[in-house]
Image (cartoon, rainbow, N blue to C red):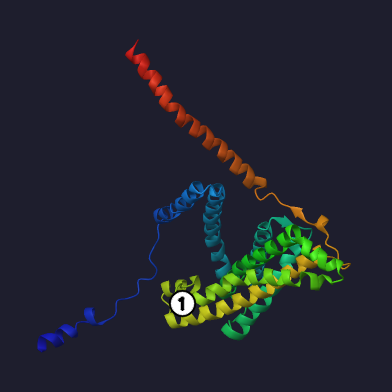
Amino acid sequence: MDMLQSYISQPALCSAQPDPGPAYISATGVALGAALIVVNAIVSFMLELDLHWQLLIAAIRCVVQLLVLGYILVPIFTAGLWWLVLLYSCFMLLVGCWEAVSRPSYTYMGMLCHALVSVGSAAAVFLSYGLLLIIRTKPWWQAQYFIPVLGMLLGNCISGVSVGLSTVLEELTTGKDRVELLLAFGASRWEATKQLVQRAVKLACTPILNQMNVVGIVSIPGMMTGQILAGSDPSQAARYQMIVMFLIAATTAVGSVASVLFATFNIVDTKHRIRSDRLKKKDKRNGWAKKMGDDMQRVCKHFEAGLKKMPADNAATKSLLAHP
């Protein structure tokens, strides 16, 4: 019994081990993680999806943007200046909306402005609601909360907006016959496009609904994972994640509805006519991305041609050596 008591009373065995904090990830670890993108490239090659160049560009952008973000956030967090936080938030909004309007196959004049108004208004309202009434940060613009929560709201909202815009613009281009028929029979532009708007908004909200259905059982979201890795109480991390999920759902819904209505009523004017002349087909690979992809394709073709030529050159060399 005395031996058991002495064994239990040892501080090294009774006291909980100190939390070492998040595991350190080296540059080699990042490189090993980046190597996994080869899996996506193999799938693209095997199924002839023609996505390998987009995957490469996306991977490069991911690495560069996250590295830059890590260095940018340090002075923003330490400075404690409200105008600096808002300035960077406006930059996040602009880049996010630019990405959202670049995904649909069709575009129209003022599409970026409409996305900025839709996403910006929705994010501002619900971010303010969450920080002022729920989390109650002091000051309300504290970068530690403001920027990460805004980033999650924008990231999910622009995905919904891009899906909604893609759906409604495709329908008003390839499936406009039904809308024109309803307009010809005297329907207003809202009556003629109501089902189209409903379908677009439903598709835009489906991802966040699916995510809410499986969160906590199938998946552990990023915010909760980050807090747990940082040593926070899992129950408190779960509460933060609940709030963020509800804010994301509301922001996505309002932003998607607003952007879809902007697009619909821009293409179907006040005189209840479909203005197909306002729609423009986009080249999905344009600008520097297209040039980079074309250059890389040429380099790979030259490399493949060189590989195919090597066996013939080796055979000719062996023939010359055998018969000098």
Residue 75 in picture, x, y percent from top left: 56, 65
Residue 153 in picture, x, y percent from top left: 60, 71
The mark tally for this picture is: 1
Above-or-below relation of 264 to 17: above
Q: Which residue is mark 1?
A: 216
Q: The disc labelled 1 sits on which kind of residue?
A: Gly
Q: Which corner quadrant of the image does residue 90 belong to?
A: bottom right
Q: Which corner quadrant of the image does residue 244 belong to?
A: bottom right
Q: Nearer the viewer, residue 35 or 261?
A: 261
Judged from this view, the residue extending furthest toward the bottom is 1
Badge 1 crowding class, 10 Å Cα cut-off, few under 14, some 14 to 19, many 20 or more, is some
The quadrant the C terminus occupies is top left
- Secondary structure beneath dot 1 equals loop
Q: Residue at x 14, y 85 (%)?
A: 6
Residue 291 in picture, x, y percent from top left: 63, 42
Horizontal side, residue 71 vs residue 140: left or right: left
Above-or-below relation of 40 to 131: above
Q: Nearer the viewer, residue 141 or 203?
A: 203
Q: Can residue 147 be seen in this snapshot? A: no
Horizontal side, residue 245 vs residue 201: left or right: left
The quadrant the N terminus occupies is bottom left
